[in-house]
Image (cartoon, rainbow, N blue to C red):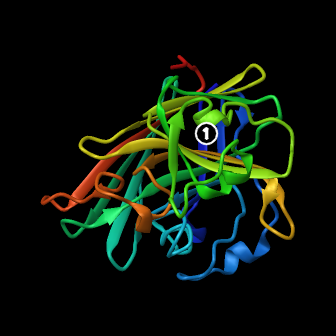
Amino acid sequence: MPTEIVTDLSHGGRWTSLKAGGREWLWHRDAPERTRVSPGDSFVDAGGLEECVPTVRGNPDHGDTWSRPWSRDGDTERVRCERFALARTIRHTDDGAEVDYTLAADPGFRFVWAAHALLDLSEHATLHARRGARTRLFPEAAPLLPHAWPGDAPWIEGRWPAPRGLSLDRFGPDDGTAVGAVVDTTRCCVHDGPDRLALALEADGQPTSIALWRNLGGFPTPAPYRSTGVEPMLGRVFDLADADHGDAACVPAAGEVRWRLTLTADCHCP
């Protein structure tokens, strides 16, 4: 079955549907206030897939593009922010879809980008990535670890699939926890029963990773809900302010960064 992608340009360019392998993959929640946001507002989580750039956490909350209207020029969808412009072109292929991105900004502009995809997954779903890949855990993981968090460290590292003893490759039932991680890999595959969704990222000369958001009813307070994110990323941190050298993408002298996201329903697991 062909892959189908639907986007809502009036409301931040958000992906509202991703159908692949005969099923809908994107999760949604009722958030009518999402239609009334303005740049600088706190993030309103309606699910789907958001383009988060130039940061995910931090300021501005979930980036600067989700709260702005986009436009379409032929096959290309665009948004312009104060310091950068982002364009994407979605192309359907025989086995899935390819999304080509271009970010234009002054040379030296640093950013993090994530395809913030919240997936509608059962408690039996699993995430497959390169075994042994370096994986960063962030402070919300501290209560789940067998040892104390080291001071004010913005992250600690371990190895996939169980960094520092915390198994992350199974989503599982709701247990009141929420944890984010960034895996040093360019591709992953989600298994949910017989269904498969593979995500891969290409970006010459830029840091690439796959971020995981496993919220099993632990966030937000006081009204938590389940939301599970698998997020191809340029960069290796959620918050641009935490980025060390090599942890964020950087616009070269040419003034543009280009990258490609590929989605298929046929997995060749790492």
> At x 67% / y 57%, what residue is drawn?
140
Counting the numbered discs, the total is: 1
What's the amino acid at mark 1? Glu
Q: Is residue 74 visible?
A: no
Q: Is residue 139 left or right of residue 210?
A: right
Placement of the N terminus among the 4 image quadrants: top right
* Residue 157 x, y percent position in the rendering: 50, 42
Secondary element at image label 1: strand
* Residue 50 x, y percent position in the rendering: 57, 58
* Residue most extreme to the top: 268
Q: Is residue 100 left or right of residue 175?
A: left
> At x 33% / y 70%, what residue is drawn?
84
> At x 39% / y 51%, what residue is drawn?
235
Q: Is residue 255 left or right of residue 47?
A: left
* Residue 144 x, y percent position in the rendering: 73, 46
> Which residue occupies the foreground of this view, 124 or 117?
124
Q: Is residue 109 left or right of residue 24?
A: left
> Which residue occupies the foreground of this view, 54 or 155?
155
> Which residue occupies the foreground of this view, 211 or 89?
211
Q: Is residue 136 visible?
A: yes
Quadrant in the picture for residue 174: top right
Query: Disc 1 designates what residue?
Result: 4
Quadrant in the picture for residue 243: bottom left
